[in-house]
Image: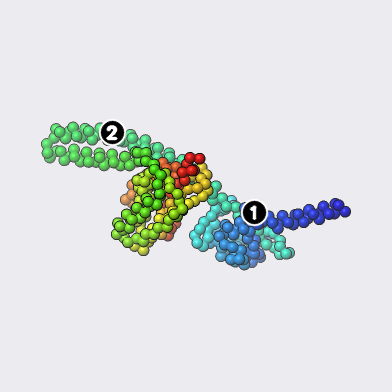
Amino acid sequence: MMMSNTMVDLQQLKAHYQQALPNQMVTAVVVLDQSLAICYVNPAAEALLVKSLSKLYQLPIEQVFYNTPINSNRLQQLLTTGQEFSDSDVTIEFFDHRKITVEITASSVTFENQPHILLEFKQIDQQKQISAEAFQQQQWESARDLIRGLAHEIKNPLGGLRGAAQLLDLELNIEQKEYTAMIIEQADRLTNLVDRLLGPNQLPVMKLQNIHIVIEKIFQLTKFDNPKNIVLERDYDPSIPELIFDQDKLQQTIINIVNNAIQVLGSDNKITLRTRAASNKTINGKRIKLCAEINIIDDGPGIPEHIQSTLFYPMVSGRASGTGLGLSICQTIVHQHNGKLSCKSRPGHTEFTILLPFNSEINS
């Protein structure tokens, strides 16, 4: 009799966990019926899809995902054969152009004597992003060091070349001085370029101050010098505390990004300067609990996809007339502030993000 009670208790316990666990799982679970319409999603799936069960219920799966390798033919084959499949590193695109990277497992299950499909999604964007950022950081530092080494090798003989031209200028007549003047002018031009390649030559002067003072100054400067009549908007979070930063250098960084946007935008486009207090961000491989997030957003044509991964490298530019030095210098300045500069772009939406740790995070 006791054994019977134990068996009943175990069965009840099993049923309890089977009912409760799907709602506690971190993995997103989506259940499809035979017509490939959604009949259940757990809370993790609601968060992943940014929609509630009430909005997703009975919605065909094709109306949820704009682009995914998990197509209807493959799912119908699963219903027919019962053979489950898994895919790793799958990029899923939604109709609002949002993209996520996931691992997917699809299996056949039976509910109420009817075959269903169980889809499990494990989002891996964050792990991939951290790995990609670490690799890009290493590549950026290598490229920067290489360029700086070359710049030093170029700068030394340039000084000698200019000095020799000045001495020669003393021995020439007025007509011949035109040539030495040209040599000196071009040597100065190259020296200026080399100095820019070497990046900021002064350490930042860090002071405790309000980040919005800088951003508001940039907003006003851009508003007054706006021949294209581009729409400017600001969206500030007043709860952000004072931060330690170099006002001039941070202003230089944001102005550079704003000016880059202005060059490709028209009068019907918009630039938004936004600030937010952000939590649980990864900056240079370190988990930061609290930081200030500055976003420079425009609705222009976007950055060419083939240069997005190397956008902050020296000598990389999306414009024919660009030197490719501005964003590299911006990256150096943000790193001097223990921060992070990143960009995500697609046609109609380009967003540069600057993360600056709160002072308590820097000292911890």
Residue 25 is tagged as 1
Query: Left or right: 327 with respect to 98?
Result: left
- Where residue 309 appears, as percent x and y from the top left, is 45, 48
Q: Label 1: few (<14), some or many (≥20) within 10 Å?
A: few
- Lower position in the chain sequence, tag 2 or tag 1: 1
Task: Quadrant for residue 229, please give it.
Answer: bottom left
Name the residue located 54 percent from the left edge and 51 percent from the top edge: 125
Q: Is residue 73 above or below residue 141?
A: below
Residue 315 is tagged as none
Q: Nearer the viewer, mark 2 or mark 1?
A: 1
Give the CA separation, mark 2 to mark 1: 65 Å
The residue type indicated by label 2 comes to Pro
Pick the residue in front: 207 or 105: 207
Quarter of the image that includes the N terminus: bottom right
Name the residue located 34 percent from the left edge and 38 percent from the top edge: 201
Check disc 2 and report the residue beneath it: 157
Tag 1 secondary structure: loop
